[in-house]
Image (cartoon, helix red, strand yellow):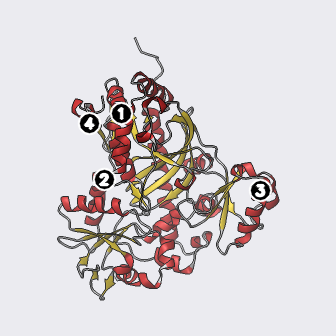
Amino acid sequence: MQDHTPSPTNADYTQEYFDIINNLDGDIASRRAALAYMEQSTAIVHHRVVACSFVPRLFNQQTFDAMKSTSEMAHRILCKVIQHYLDDPEYRAAFDFDPRLEELILLPRGYDSLLPFARVDTFLNEDDYRVKFCEFNGDGSSGMNENREITQSVELSQAFADFAQSHTVQRCELFETWVQKFINIYNSYEHKVEHPRFAICDYLENGVVDEFHIYAQLFRDHGYDCTVADVRDLSFNGGVLLDAQGKRVDAIWRRCVTNDVIDYWDESQDLIDAVRAEKVALIGSFAGHIVHDKQIFDVLFDRRTQEFLTAEEITFVEETVPMTAFLNEDEVNLEQIRANKDEWIIKPTDHYGADDVWAGCMVDQEKWGELIDTFANDAAGFPFIVQRYITPFKTETLPPDTTIASLKDDQVSSTPELYNNLNGLYLFDGEFAGVFSRLGPLPTISKQLKGITAATIWVDCKPDAFTRPCEISAAQTSDVQ
């Protein structure tokens, strides 16, 4: 007889997890240990250990299926857009790019993968599993090491061990998988060399450098010499690209975003010249900027784009991409946007880190009017977009235990609080690879606005190539029982 019992929802799993915490009287020893682990971890962004929750995001099979199908369809569409931009000079007019950006985008690539590494940030309604996009990110994306360290801190807890006794639990694997993908992409490079040397490159004051070094060591473990380098320290002699130590660089994982390249244009010419001369494989070509720039949301609805999309792809865009336009009076009704602030969010087209992102529901009417005046019609000196505001799905979690070390046990709260969710879906050469789970108490979710990160755990999902079981043992939890 067929079992028609509905499968547990993410909320069911989370409630079970809180029940376990309560049965452990708050699992306070584990929470103190998790905080101590994080304070000594490499989960550092701009010299600060990231804020995180003790409670992981617990995702079921339906969530996995929705995230995988949505992210991979988005990747296919974005690759079509990139290819048409490269092939069709007339289509390039759909974008408003600095001429220097167009120059970078059109540099030779030499391998097949159009968008090797991406993270598409999404809002998932966990009641009906519908997904809406927040933004697309290319090779400048990070968060992989945060996810790894936070997951490790949670896996050591008694609450997690007890939960895992009743379920199959799997973590996201975001390191070995990408290293192997990178190697495979390099091996398809037209000008590959024997025994290549790799470099992970950014403007290091802007990069998540601890994460870079972890990947560099993994490349070395796979037999490929790899260094971490600042773009400005590279030099090109016409035949070979060299790092600051004078050592050859044959392939680069580009972690620098293109607007930083523009900001450091003169200091970046050696890298650009080496790519132009096809003396280095830039994995994550500058064509990824087409995805990074938020005007892509507007271009997806453009007639010139929809002419080469299938009917299924057009429907997908309509269902998942919020209405987006430049914040200019010749494109939108500024007075309608001014009068209906809660319906809208405004963003610069080409910044990162939630810089100058404003949701109308976060500010009063007077402030919203000031923001429109400041940013509309390129008044700030660079373009802004306006986008339909998507209300994030709220789930229960525990705020960061930042003060738990100094509190007595009876002062520690285990009461759940509702936080908004933003799910970053990683794609390695077009394959869904895992989730960067971010939460926040405010309508805009970012580190600057009390945002936190949570571990991502797949629960009772069928095995998949990119996940591995969480390793739980009595020895791991004996010190916190």
Q: Is residue 312 left or right of residue 251?
A: right
Q: Nearer the viewer, mark 3 or mark 4?
A: 4
Q: Earlier in the sequence, mark 1 or mark 3?
A: 1
Q: Amino acid at mark 4?
A: Glu
Q: Which residue is mark 3?
A: 337
Q: Nearer the viewer, mark 2 or mark 4?
A: 4
Q: Earlier in the sequence, mark 2 or mark 4?
A: 2
The residue under the point 82% across, 59% down is 335
Marks 1 and 3, how far apart at CA:
50 Å
**Figure quadrant of residue 378:** bottom right
For the N terminus, the image quarter is top left
Q: Which residue is mark 4?
A: 471
For the C terminus, the image quarter is top left
Q: Amino acid at mark 2?
A: Phe
Q: Amino acid at mark 1?
A: Ala
Q: Earlier in the sequence, mark 2 or mark 3?
A: 2
Marks 3 and 4, how far apart at CA:
51 Å
Q: Which residue is mark 2?
A: 175
Q: Residues within 10 Å of mark 1 (few under 14, many from 20)?
A: some
Q: Earlier in the sequence, mark 3 or mark 4?
A: 3
Marks 2 and 3, how far apart at CA:
43 Å
Marks 1 and 4, how far apart at CA:
20 Å
For the residues bearing labels 2 and 4, Cβ distance under 8 angstroms: no
Q: Residues within 10 Å of mark 4 (few under 14, many from 20)?
A: some
- The secondary structure type at the circle numbered 4 is loop
**Figure quadrant of residue 268:** bottom left
